[in-house]
Image (cartoon, rainbow, N blue to C red):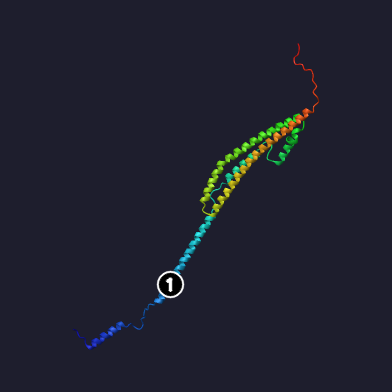
Amino acid sequence: MIKLRPLAAASAVALSLAIAIPPASAQWIVFDPTNYAQNVLTAARELQQVNNEIQSLTNEAQMLVNQAKNLASLPMSTLTQLQSSIAQTRTLLSQAQNIAFNVQQIEQSYSSSYGAAAGSGSTSAMVANAETRWQNSVAAFEDSLKVQAGVVGNIPTNTNAMTSLVSASQNATGALQAAQAGNQLLALQSGQLSDLVAVLSAKSRADALEQARQAAAEAQGQQNYKLFSTRSTYAPGTVTMFRSN
């Protein structure tokens, strides 16, 4: 066993103490659990706040995207087709022969050829009026058939437009597109109702003129019978059927 001398032992103890005891200028590192926990909570709150702000910005961006979709216009329009169909029907109505769809012209025609005028005037005048009334009836039935044919011709166009609008409404990306598709469907329905009114008007016009012609014919027949019955008594005369040589 090695034995140290007293001086060497004292030196060794002093050296170990010098190593163990830090110098006066050094600082102690102290761990505070409470302060650490508070710092962690503070950092977590700040992180949560950042996440909330990110989510808020994301929601605002999505809201802007939705607003853009809601303001997007419908990429199609059937207005031109609808206007063309309506214009065609109106053209057919405006081509009504003899007596047009005009109140003043109807009143003038009735005062000159129908009503009391049917049983007045000379025989030649009554025959001319009867011919005019017959021509009016024939022309009115022709006009009615033309309008019906034109409306039937509009059916394929209206059907295609309705199919396109229903598809566009179902695939609309925003409120504006859906509203525009709905408005065009309503406009298409209005156009179809206009065609229906045109057909009924043309058919009713033809029926009314024919009924008026029949009534005028009755009035004219009564007047003719009255004229015939009030003539002077027939005086027989000599009639030569064969000439003698």
Q: Is 16 on the left or on the right of 106, as rendered?
A: left
Position of residue 129 measured from the top left corner of the image (x, y, whole percent): 72, 32
Position of residue 70 measured from the top left corner of the image (x, y, whole percent): 53, 55
In front of the other: 223 or 108: 223
Query: What crowding class fits label 1: few (fewer than 14 Cα within 10 Å), some (14-19), or many (20 or more)?
Result: few
Position of residue 82 measured from the top left corner of the image (x, y, whole percent): 58, 45
Q: In this view, does 135 lie above or below 27?
A: above
Badge 1 amino acid: Leu
Position of residue 182 measured from the top left corner of the image (x, y, whole percent): 56, 50
Q: Is 95 on the left or on the right of 226, as rendered?
A: left
Residue 148 quadrant: top right
Residue found at the very far top of the displayed protein: 245
In front of the other: 104 or 115: 115
Q: Residue at x 71, y 41 (%)?
A: 103
Q: Is 219 on the left or on the right of 89, as rendered?
A: right
Q: Which residue is drawn at 72% across and 33% down?
A: 218
Secondary element type, mark 1: helix
Which residue does the numbered mark 1 point to in the structure image? 41
Q: Which residue is drawn at 51% across and 50% down?
A: 170
Q: In this view, does 206 lie above or below 32?
A: above
Quarter of the picture containing the N terminus is bottom left
Quarter of the picture containing the C terminus is top right
Residue found at the very far left of the displayed protein: 1
Residue 35 quadrant: bottom left
Total marks in image: 1
